[in-house]
Amino acid sequence: MSANEGIVFNIQNFSVHDGTGIRTIVFLKGCPLRCAWCSNPESQMRKPQLGFNPMKCLTTDKCTRCIDNCPQGAISPAEGGLIAMDPEKCVRCHTCAEHCAANALNVYGKTMTVKEVIREVEKEAAFYARSGGGMTLSGGEAMSQPKFAVALLKEAKRHRIKTAMETCSYAHYDDLKAACEYLDEVIMDIKAIDDGKHKQGTGVSNQRILENIKCVVAEFPNKPILIRTPVIPGFNDTEEEIRGIVDFIPVQSNIRYELLPYHRMGQPKYSYLGMEYPYEGKALDKGVMERLRVLEREANERFKNAQ
């Protein structure tokens, strides 16, 4: 696949959480991490995936269009009027989703060109001008498609659209640096300082992540950088864990720190994809965020007053 096209699984308008002002978030497919709490499981694999939402299905009593139109005969009636898919027969042509009247079958991810994405982003240009917003690349992990991501950022700047990127920072530094050249602001995650804990929760070491963050901070001292930590029950939801992360962050006036409370909004998508949700039944204890917010405020005060 060339730099001019990539796989996008969502374009979300009117976001106010991932960069300054009102944003359009472009979600790119693919991620090198496998966070146990991931809220976008459909983002992990780079290729398009078929999901099935049984709550939308009209049932085989009323509709059999997916069964009738599957060229491989991979779909059959199942218990309760629902459908079953045979993974041995399925060739991922996604014809079934094209014929699903109720959108119970949905394909996560489609190939788009840079021009097509920017055309969608530009539809909300009036809101960017008023709020100071723009386009934010997210995922998955935008750096899983580095050439496409950089091409999108470069084209956005050519159209005078402000840019941001949310990244886990697990990437080749040359790719990350190339993206930063076209970014007005950077959002970077630190999930854990201890390498063993990080491997346990995400499946990968944090050494590349921490080194990349240090390099970005050093090479782009005037670029607004937001460092985030998702607060996950039983993983990093203690003052000791958050203090360790805060102590790692260089004290510079261009940096802010933010804690994101754990949520389960992505849980239904696991069942749509035939996946188990590892954090079933888990939640943050009452009062945890209030205690950790103290550390967040103290850190931001230090960053703000840095020389």
Image (cartoon, grey):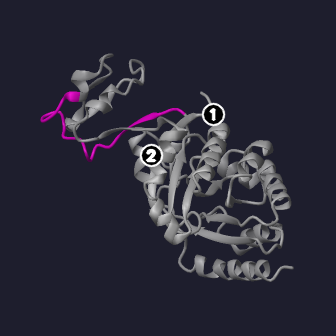
Q: How far from the left and from the top, in percent, is residue 50?
A: 40, 34
Quarter the C terminus occupies: bottom right
The residue tagged 2 is 270
Does residue 282 show up? yes
> Which label belongs to residue 88?
none
Q: Is residue 292 left or right of residue 177?
A: left
> Residue 226's quadrant in the figure?
bottom right
Mark 1 surroundings within 10 Å by alpha-carbon count, few (fewer than 14), some (14 through 19), many (20 or more) = some
Label 2 neighbour load within 10 Å: few <14, some 14-19, many 20+: some
* Secondary structure, magenta segment, majority class: loop
Residue in view at x 55 percent, y 60 percent: 134
| Viewer-proximal residue among 163 and 88 | 163
- The mark lying in front, picked from 2 and 1, is 1
Locate residue 297, reporting x and y percent.
69, 82
Query: Would you name the residue on which mark 1 appears?
Result: 3
Q: Considering the numbered disc 1 on the image, is that residue within a helix, a strand or a loop?
A: loop
| Residue 79, above or below 283 | above
Against 216, residue 28 (above or below) is above
Residue at the left extreme of this rendering: 62
Does any portion of residue 264 appear in the rendered image? no
Q: Position of residue 187 (x, y in %)?
A: 66, 60
Tag 1 or tag 2, which sits nearer the N-term?
1
Range of the magenta residues? Answer: 47-65
CB within 8 Å, label 2 to label 1: no
Residue 59 among magenta residues: yes
